Amino acid sequence: MFPLTVVGRDKTIPKATVIIIAINLLIFLWELSVDAKGDGYLKAALQNYGLEVCKIGEQPIATTGLDAFRSLFLHASAGHVLGNMWFLFLFGGLVERYLGSIKFALAYLGFGALATLAHVALGNTVCTVTDTGVVIGASGAIAGVMGGFLILRPNAKVKTMLGFFRPFVWSVNVPAFLFLGYWLLMDVMQQVGWIGVETDMAHWAHIGGFLAGLLVIFFAGFVKPLPKPDPLEHLAE
């Protein structure tokens, strides 16, 4: 299941979301320039600038914090960064409009930090001489945005691609609570081993980030009323 768009999505430009996407893409271009230098250069750069879980406790807290911050803007491949940025583009705007651009940017970083903590605490990283548990990627922070979106618009229709048919793609509108719930369930099932798919994804970071976003926006609703659903949003399809 891959999201194509959110039906009725506000067409105003969410500034913080766009800036975060631009920063991630620019940094990935830098990664490509490093990779062009030859084999091993990019891996060394990611180890140097990303968060190495196995070094936590061996280096100053400030260094660990800086590495954790930088890791939110590093990606392993073009598919990794483009997929993450697409999800942020689809789900970030609504959360930003609710929180405001500055608070959204701070919340985004906070979701990323909590996602990283979840991975460090529960990820069962196996440390070896060649594997120091490098954590990179924005997906934990974006999972927090998705959790916030679930609270704000649980019944929003997510146009979702299910397969390549008719003759290009086969898509269906799925309520956000089903799409996002399915996304979270797949992470949980992969983490506990119920789905035998070997990946290097930090599932606990996804789960932790999602729950952080869900709880933050839920409690924010006691301070600022949650937006009411638009009864005419289906007309925007």
Image: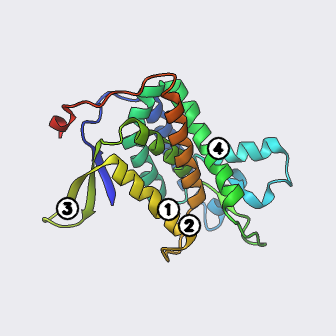
The residue indicated by pointer 3 is 170
Return the residue nearer the eye: 40 or 155.
155
Question: Residue at 48% of width from left, 74% of height from top?
Answer: 195
Q: If you read the primary sequence from the N terminus, does the residue marked by circle 4 or circle 3 appear first? A: 4
Q: Position of residue 52 (x, y in %)?
A: 73, 57
Marks 2 and 1 in Cβ contact (< 8 Å): yes
Q: CA distance from mark 4 to mark 3?
A: 37 Å
Q: If you read the primary sequence from the N terminus, does the residue marked by circle 3 or circle 2 appear first? A: 3
| The label number, if any, that marks residue 191 in the structure image | 2
Kind of residue indicated by mark 3: Trp
Res 38 quadrant in image: bottom right
Residue 6 horizontal side relative to residue 188, left or right:
left
Q: CA distance from mark 1 to mark 4?
A: 19 Å
Q: Position of residue 218 (x, y in %)?
A: 50, 35
Relative to 50, is 90 above or below?
above
Kind of residue indicated by mark 2: Gln
Question: Residue at 53% of width from left, 75% of height from top?
Answer: 198
